[in-house]
Image (cartoon, rainbow, N blue to C red):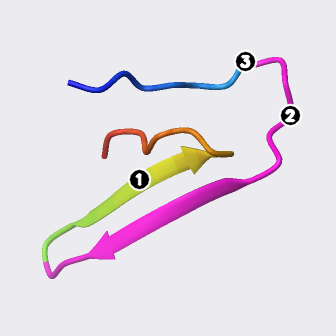
Amino acid sequence: MSAITEPNPTELSAAIKLGIQAHAKRFCVVRQIDGSTLQPV
């Protein structure tokens, strides 16, 4: 299991990326802040 790295909440982020996967019954969204690993759906 890989560790999730999160930036310090008091620091500003340079980039926040969202990935959205759309299906007929639901949407799945993941978030990546700066160069960190993807956060769980």
Look at the numbered disc 3 and give the secondary structure of its residue: loop
Question: Along the horizontal axis of the image, is 13 left or right of 21?
Answer: right
Task: Tell me which amino acid carries mark 1.
Answer: Val
Q: Position of residue 15 (x, y in %)?
A: 75, 53
Look at the numbered disc 1 and give the secondary structure of its residue: strand
Residue 14 in the magenta stretch? The answer is yes
The residues tagged by marks 2 and 3 sit, at their Cα atoms, a distance apart of: 8 Å
The quarter holding residue 1 reads top left
Identify the residue position indicated by label 3 in the image.
8
Residue 21 in the magenta stretch? The answer is yes
The crowd level at tag 2 (other Cα within 10 Å; few <14, some 14-19, many 20+) is few
Look at the numbered disc 2 and give the secondary structure of its residue: loop
Q: Residue at coordinates 58% horizontally, 25% vertically from top-left?
A: 6
Front residue (pair 24, 5): 5
Identify the residue position indicated by label 1 in the image.
30
Q: Position of residue 32 (x, y in %)?
A: 54, 48
Q: Check the image and report above or below for 41 versus 4.
A: below
Task: Tell me which amino acid carries mark 3.
Answer: Asn
The residues tagged by marks 2 and 1 sit, at their Cα atoms, a distance apart of: 19 Å
